[in-house]
Amino acid sequence: MENSFVKTFDNNDDMFSYLEEQQKQAKKLADQYNAKEVIPKYKYWALNEPSLDLVIVGKRWEPSANPTPEELEDVESVNSAMESGWIFARWYSFACPEGELGDNHISRCFPIPDFIFSFCLQYIQGE
């Protein structure tokens, strides 16, 4: 089951050890990709999931011009995750043409220009 999205554990200690190791690896990759500096520079991102034959494009989440207190809390959380390389965005694909908020690691993504994002989004949404 190594190539599966599902991971099972015999106990909670094993699960938390695994999660801790994954967080360390994510942070190490974030440092290699200079995530803290690179992610804020780009609004649009893409990634390819060859195992699913799926291309995903995303628009990085940004707070509104007059953020609510809840949005300000989200900003702190998003910024903290970004330091570990996570790009929080609305991601679009043929599997989810309406878009879904979520995160992907910078090591799996690449920035794209806005016209490429717009083209892909129109294609995905059948416009």
Image: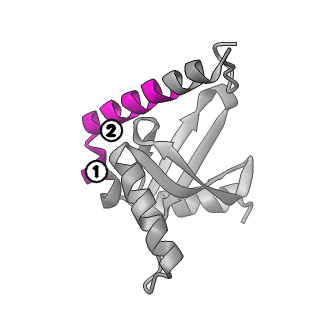
Q: Is residue 106 left or right of residue 54?
A: left
Mark 2 / mark 1, whichever is N-terminal: 2
Mark sitting on residue 30: 2
Q: Residue furthest bottom?
A: 66
Q: Is residue 26 magenta?
A: yes
Nearer the observer, 84 or 58: 84
Query: Residues at badges 2 and 1 in contact (C-beta under 8 Å)?
Result: yes
Residue depicted at x 37% and y 43%: 84
Real-space CA distance between mark 2 and mark 1, rounded to the nearest whole angstrom: 8 Å
Task: Identify the image quadrant of the N terminus.
Answer: top right
Q: Amino acid at mark 2?
A: Ala
The image quarter in which residue 48 lies: top right
Nearer the observer, 45 or 39: 39
Disc 1 residue crowd, few under 14, some 14–19, many 20+, Cα 10 Å: some
Residue interval drawn in magenta: 19-38
Disc 2 residue crowd, few under 14, some 14–19, many 20+, Cα 10 Å: many
Q: Main secondary structure of the magenta part?
A: helix
Q: Amino acid at mark 1?
A: Lys
Task: Kindly identify which residue carries mark 1.
Answer: 36
